[in-house]
């Protein structure tokens, strides 16, 4: 019985809580968690896992619920384990440049705690104010600075976990170098709550960057945008290279009633963040490409306030297009295929009524990661021929249907279609070893019965 493990105020059964804690940021279907529990100690988590194994109960780990792949979603009468009470930042070590915390610590609080010691935790995205570090680790979250700093995986120096069979593991123990056979820490990074519960995390931190500047550039042709990237990639120290299409920009301008900093009539835009000392070099390249009519317009921020305003055009896209209830794709493909991929998307999803947008494109182009957000066609099944053509293209070019958001429930079918059966079989064997009774987030990523 849950009441043998948790105090009464640590368990919720009501519908409002079920709707709040039983879903992630994008899941709109109905949910039916058996209960939501709020552990305040590792001992309670261990007891819960032991109880679930004995009584065949199922568990959904829940962080900040900002996930986009229906990973923290309870549709099968599972017990949702909210990690929100386990949110302490226990230590920031200035000499070691590291931070230790519980898995429920909010990403932005971690960033702020590092800043108080004049250090940086550089993984950042628009949901950092709500997401938990445990959720970031479980999804190997990327974000807008991957081009410079890599994704969450690069920053995790230690993980404490309780596996689905109740074993407590302390993995890597904060070391910078540790070649001691298989790195189990890396198995948990990106495991989407299917192997066990992450309880504590230690992160590397780094020095703050020098002064950075932000540039917004517009293009009419995707080829020109790529030429620009190729030109600056080896010459300029890039901290971000983010792109968005005209539709995405217009949605933000409309939602936030913003005056555009440059004409919103061009097809593509990029935000470049770079070291301020390199401004002259970068602007020379921009001017030359402007002269060649490859770049259509550009504006450089001249204050921190303007930096933030330009960043806002990119960071507010998801919120601005939410009214369209878009179907979200998080796609990745090698740079050499990007151009034909963009053309293919245009070809597949072109709208018969050209006055209305049919999709929004934006993403972390510096990492070859495109977020395609499709406006569902009324009365048409999304798992349609069009989606099949998109995935066929990706498969032919060795792309991925999950660059950074994970698989969850949402992409189970496409995961199976895109990935090698032997690889998936091995993953299932790993899952069975860590979680023999399949109590941890069952049905996410794959169905074990397959
Ligand atoms: C506006 C917006 C922008 C975003 N931008 C980006 C982006 O740029 N890059 C990016 O990568 N993602 C992005 N995301 C997606 C999301 O924020 C990340 O995936 C984030 O890491 C999820 O963290 P969370 O705590 O909210 O996890 P949840 O949504 O609560 O859970 C995600 C998965 O992790 C598991 N999980 C959570 N906590 C634990 C734990 N302690 N132990 C084991 N498993 C656990 C859950 O079961 C689930 O499978 C964005 C989301 C939004 C809403």
Image (spheres, grey):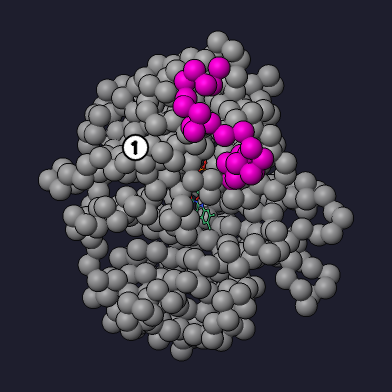
Image check: 169 left or right of 415?
left
| Residue at point 60%, 68% (across, down) | 320
Instruction: Give x and y (percent) for residue 417.
Output: 68, 36
- Foreground: 206 or 252? 252
Name the image quarter holding residue 54. top right
Image check: 274 left or right of 144?
left
- Foreground: 22 or 444? 22
Q: How many marks?
A: 1
| Residue at point 83%, 70% (across, down) | 352
- Which residues are drawn in magenta? 1-24
- Which class describes the residues within 10 Å of circle 1: few (<14), some (14-19), or many (20+)? many
Is residue 43 inside the magenta stretch?
no
| Residue at point 17%, 44% (across, down) | 93
Instruction: Give x and y (percent) for residue 251.
Output: 63, 73
Name the image quarter holding residue 327. bottom right
Instruction: Give x and y (percent) for residue 347.
Output: 74, 63
Image check: 403 left or right of 40?
right
Instruction: Give x and y (percent) for residue 79.
Output: 58, 28
State the residue position of label 1: 102
- Establish if 347 lies above or below 75: below
Is residue 21 inside the magenta stretch?
yes
- Establish if 368 lies above or below 314: above
Name the image quarter holding residue 60. top right
Identify the residue at the far bottom of this view: 291
């Amino acid at each position: 019985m849950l009441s043998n493990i948790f105090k009464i105020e640590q368990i919720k059964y009501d519908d409002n809580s079920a709707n709040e804690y039983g879903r992630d940021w994008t899941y709109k279907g109905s949910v039916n968690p058996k209960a939501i529990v709020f552990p305040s100690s590792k001992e309670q988590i261990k007891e819960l896992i032991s109880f679930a194994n004995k009584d065949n109960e199922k568990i959904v780990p829940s962080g900040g619920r900002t996930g986009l792949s229906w990973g923290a979603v309870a549709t099968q009468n599972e017990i949702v384990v909210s990690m929100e009470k386990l949110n302490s930042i226990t230590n920031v070590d200035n000499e070691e440049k590291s931070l230790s915390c519980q898995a429920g610590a909010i990403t932005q609080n971690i960033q702020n705690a590092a800043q108080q010691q004049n250090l940086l935790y550089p993984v950042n995205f628009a949901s950092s104010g709500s997401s938990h570090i445990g959720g970031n680790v479980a999804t190997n979250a990327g974000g807008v600075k991957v081009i410079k700093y890599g994704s969450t995986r690069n920053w995790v120096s230690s993980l404490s976990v309780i596996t689905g069979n109740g074993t407590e593991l302390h993995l890597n123990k904060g070391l910078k170098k540790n070649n001691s056979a298989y790195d189990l820490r890396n198995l948990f990074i990106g495991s989407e709550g299917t192997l066990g519960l992450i309880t504590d995390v230690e992160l590397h931190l780094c020095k703050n960057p020098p002064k950075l500047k932000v540039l917004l550039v517009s293009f009419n042709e995707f080829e020109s945008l790529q030429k620009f990237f190729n030109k600056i990639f080896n010459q300029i120290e890039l901290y971000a290279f983010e792109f968005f299409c005209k539709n995405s920009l217009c949605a933000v301008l409309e939602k936030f009633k913003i005056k555009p900093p440059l004409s919103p009539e061009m097809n593509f835009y990029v935000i470049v963040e770079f070291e301020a000392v390199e401004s002259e070099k970068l602007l020379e390249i921009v001017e030359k490409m402007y002269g060649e009519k490859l770049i259509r317009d550009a504006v450089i921020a001249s204050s921190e306030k303007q930096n933030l305003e330009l960043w806002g055009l990119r960071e507010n896209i998801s919120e601005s297009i939410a009214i369209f209830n878009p179907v979200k794709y998080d796609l990745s493909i090698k740079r050499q295929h990007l151009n034909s991929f963009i053309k293919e998307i245009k070809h597949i999803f072109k709208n018969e009524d050209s006055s209305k947008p049919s999709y929004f494109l934006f993403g972390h182009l510096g990492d070859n990661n495109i977020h395609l957000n499709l406006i569902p066609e009324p009365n048409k099944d999304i798992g349609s021929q069009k989606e099949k053509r998109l995935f066929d293209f990706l498969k032919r070019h060795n792309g991925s249907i999950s660059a950074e958001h994970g698989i969850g429930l949402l992409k189970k079918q496409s995961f199976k279609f895109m990935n090698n059966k032997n690889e998936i079989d091995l993953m299932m064997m790993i899952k069975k070893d860590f979680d023999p009774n399949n109590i941890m987030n069952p049905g996410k990523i794959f169905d074990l019965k397959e």
